[in-house]
Amino acid sequence: MSASEIGAPRHQTAERLFHWLMAVAILVCVFTAFLPIVGVDFEWVDIHWIAGFVLTASIVFHLWRVFMVLGLSDMALHRQDLTDLKGISDPAFEPIPGRKYDLGQKLYHWGIAVVVLATVVSGILMTLKLDTPMWDRDPGLFSGQAWGLIYAGHGLAALALIFMFLLHLYFSLLPEHRDLLRAMIRSKYVSMDKRHS
């Protein structure tokens, strides 16, 4: 049964749980980082780094699933994916059937992967300046200039992450993508052509 057939599972439960856990962790990180900037006063630091570690754990889980269970084939870029570029100028273009992800989805995935990893790595480095149950703070680990670069990198990655999140939200709410959103919620995929035939 292909993903274009009515009721075909598009995402396994583990992938859907990862997706929603990652989304919640990102939203908690975004709100705990930016609400204090706009004047909302609360104890945000512990919530922020704990959400960051939840995000990190969810990414480690996802990477384990990709390399040990799922494989890279669905998300790998192939030469045939480039035919999707014809759809930009040709409204009658029909994408290659039978693929789980098109070129745009793959490029978004790789882009968000880079942005999230940059955010997580810089965030983990920043937690070295905090007292946590796992370690005592060590602000002398890096020079002042290095800390400045880490903080700037984390901030830029966070802004890029917000942009990518909003982009993802926008495309998931488009009428032509609602089936993909439903599949991420309920796992079953119903293609537009099958529903209207």
Image: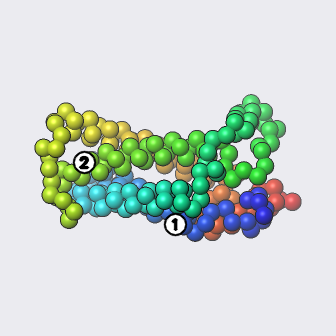
Q: How many marks?
A: 2
Q: Residue at x 18, y 50 (%)?
A: 129
User: In the image, residue 139 lies at what x, y percent?
Assistant: 14, 46
Residue 148 shown left or right of residue 166 in the figure: left
Task: Establish if 61 lies above or below 38.
Answer: below
Which colour scheme appears in the figure? rainbow
Q: Which residue is mark 2?
A: 126
Amino acid residing under circle 2: Met
- Camera-side residue of 165 and 82: 82
Q: Residue at x 77, y 43 (%)?
A: 95
Residue 175 appears anywhere in the view: no
Find residue 186 and report its image quarter: bottom right
Task: Establish if 125 lies above or below 47.
Answer: above
Residue 74 shown left or right of residue 38 in the figure: right
User: In the image, residue 160 lies at what x, y percent?
Assistant: 43, 41
Question: Which image quarter is the C terminus in?
Answer: bottom right
Residue 108 appears anywhere in the view: yes
Q: Residue at x 18, y 59 (%)?
A: 135
CB under 8 Å between discs 2 and 1: no
User: Mark 2: which secondary structure?
Assistant: helix
Q: N-terminal of the two: label 2 or label 1?
A: 1
Specify the farthest residue to the front.
68
User: In the image, residue 27 lies at what x, y percent?
Assistant: 41, 56
Q: Which residue is mark 1?
A: 17
Neighbor class of circle 1 (other Cα within 10 Å; few <14, some 14-19, many 20+) is some
User: How far is mark 2 from mark 1, CA to CA?
Assistant: 27 Å
Find residue 13 and report its image quarter: bottom right
Specify the farthest residue to the right.
197
Amino acid residing under circle 1: Leu
